[in-house]
Amino acid sequence: MTAPFFPANILIPKEGFEKWSVIACDQYTSDSKYWKDVENTVADAPSSLRITLPEIFLEDNDVSERVEKINETMKKYLSDGIFEELKNTFIYVERTLRSDTIRKGIIGVIDLEAYDFSTDSTALVRATERTVTERIPPRVKIRQNAPLELPHIMVLFDDPGDSIFSSLAKFKPTMKKVYDFKLMKNSGYISGWKADGAAAEDIKKGFDDLLKRSTDHASGKAPLLFAVGDGNHSLATAKTCWEAIKKDLTEEQRATHPARFALAEAVNIHDSSLDFEPIHRVLFNTNTEIFREELLNYFKGRINEDLCEVNDFNDFVTVSTDYEHVYELTEKKTNLTIGDVQEFLDYYIKEVDTGAKIDYIHGDGTAIELGRKENNVAILMPSISKSDLFDMVMLAGVLPRKTFSMGEADDKRFYLEAKQII
């Protein structure tokens, strides 16, 4: 059996990497200052900022015009020849994080025929968290007429012995370095090497071997080769667009159509630099006392409110201008505390305070700062152990949406590589 991860014709800018590369669109969704700073940094230079749509702008009135401008700019960048094409290759990536640790990754393409984001998926590539289907149509509008894709997708593989990167190390001295620069806004450093020829074959063999081991480990259950760590809604959008496109293609055309393959970075879940961080919730424009009363009533008989500090993964914290409380969920209806809390928040917004707005926040400090503003409440969620992720998904299916984040916001993938999809 062949692993559904392949080399591709990858586009990178010929120059100006520092202004070209910007953080993933789903970061800093409530921080307009961050994006204003990025805008000022980029100025008039070619940039991935001009061909992606930060989610902070998704509800603006001019979204349609923005999408049209994105597509026009993609075509202009292609016609202006700003890209270098790296043919039939992987890219080996070393990302130096703000902590000075290095995260290793491999850029290649996922075969979307091997990916399924449904909750009962048994595909080789699966979502780790529940996909919010309502979030897909706006993204389809951006992608369906776009000639390019730029990924912030990161897929995880389970390689405790680090066999793939250990084997690749012998090729590194002879691989061509294709980028090497400092990321904007103190987000670390990134280097990339072209892994083609024998190095690419070594990577493919490594994933084929890993697939065999994953199949053996599954013990009769459907094996899981790649778990989507970041960018699940982007990958789900690519899948949705591909399903629409392939209806009008012959079998021969389907086999090689560029929209069938989505660019992504593959990272070993056991990478020492990879930290799983919780994704917190912040409610805006709500009555904080009514929120607290409703929370205690909703969880009546299965919540302990007498804690002084967080002890384990059953605990969560609420922060507002009026209070700061630690709660223990003593009885859960879902697999995880975060699942029960999310169900309460969905109920609260739908049935109690329809004027409240929720956002999903990366980073304890940012969440607490927002929670302490008038008429806001931050709900700080517990984290999960990364070593349990693959078994959890194989045994229990996808996790509640926005369960975890891989590292702090500034450690997320930056847009850098691109691929043509039409």
Image: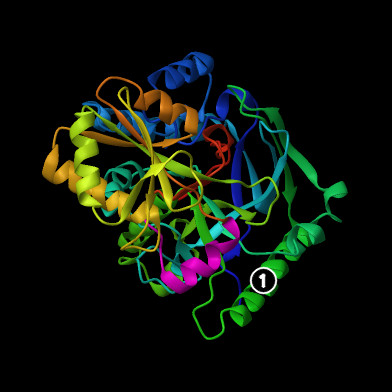
Which residue is tagged 1?
210
- The type of residue carrying mark 1 is Leu
Q: Position of residue 343 (x, y in %)?
A: 26, 53
Of all residues, the one furthest to the front in this rendering is 306
Element carrying mark 1: helix
Q: Is residue 288 left or right of residue 208?
A: left
Q: Position of residue 373 (x, y in %)?
A: 32, 20
Q: Is residue 125 left or right of residue 287?
A: right
Seen at 40% across and 63% down, the residue is 398
Magenta stretch: includes residue 296: no
Q: Residues within 10 Å of mark 1 (few under 14, many from 20)?
A: some
Q: Quadrant of residue 32?
A: top left
Task: Report if residue 422 is visible in the image.
Answer: no
Seen at 62% across and 74% down, the residue is 211
Q: Quadrant of the N terminus?
A: bottom right
Q: Position of residue 107 (x, y in %)?
A: 62, 50
Of residues 412 and 387, the one drawn nearer to the viewer in this rendering: 387
Seen at 58% across and 36% down, the residue is 411
Magenta stretch: includes residue 400: yes
Task: Report if residue 122 is visible in the image.
Answer: yes
Q: Magenta segment range?
A: 386-401
In this view, 309 is above or below 69 = below
Seen at 45% across and 27% down, the residue is 366
In this view, 342 is above or below 112 = above
Of residues 14 and 135, the one drawn nearer to the viewer in this rendering: 135
Of residues 236 and 386, the one drawn nearer to the viewer in this rendering: 386
